[in-house]
Image (tube, rainbow, N blue to C red):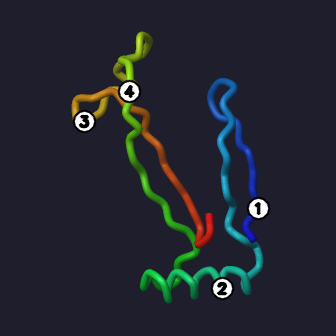
Amino acid sequence: MGRDLFVPFEGHQRHHVLLPPDCLEERKEISDHFHEKYKFPHCIEIIDGTHLGLAFNPELHREDYFTRKQTYAISVTIVCNHDK
């Protein structure tokens, strides 16, 4: 199974990061699962991004949160494997 790691970024926030497995057999098992279930060959992780809308407009650094859709949001990148 992949190794879990907490990585500090700006400020005091901590972000959970899932590292890919080191073992080639495990990578093959995950790859086979993605191929059988979703028809994605040679895949061990899925990465996607989205915006999480903010309920209130930020008071500081508003421009950092303003999206191309003219709303305020936080940009999020999500990485997952076949079972997380």
- Cβ–Cβ under 8 Å for marks 4 and 3: no
Q: Secondary structure at mark 2?
A: helix
- In the figure, is residue 5 to the left or right of 36? right
Instruction: State the quadrant of the C terminus.
Output: bottom right
Label 1, label 2: how far apart the Cα atoms are: 16 Å
x%, y% of residue 6? 73, 45
Give the residue displayed 75% in from the left and 71% down from the top: 1
- In the figure, is residue 31 to the left or right of 52? right
Please give the label number shown on residue 65.
4
Q: Amino acid at mark 4?
A: Tyr
Label 4, label 3: how far apart the Cα atoms are: 10 Å
User: Which residue occupies the extreme front position in the image?
Assistant: 55
Give the residue displayed 70% in from the left and 36% down from the top: 8
Front-lying residue, 52 or 69? 52
Q: Which residue is mark 2?
A: 29
Q: Secondary structure at mark 3?
A: loop
Label 4, label 2: how far apart the Cα atoms are: 39 Å
x%, y% of residue 12? 69, 26
Q: Secondary structure at mark 4?
A: helix
Label 2 vs 3, first from the N-terminus: 2
Label 1 vs 2, first from the N-terminus: 1
Label 3: how many residues lie within 10 Å, few (<14), some (14-19) or many (20+)?
few
x%, y% of residue 46? 50, 66
Label 1 vs 4, first from the N-terminus: 1
Please give the label number shown on residue 68.
3
As displayed, is residue 23 above or below residue 2? below
Label 2, label 3: how far apart the Cα atoms are: 39 Å
Please give the label number shown on residue 3.
1
Q: Amino acid at mark 1?
A: Arg
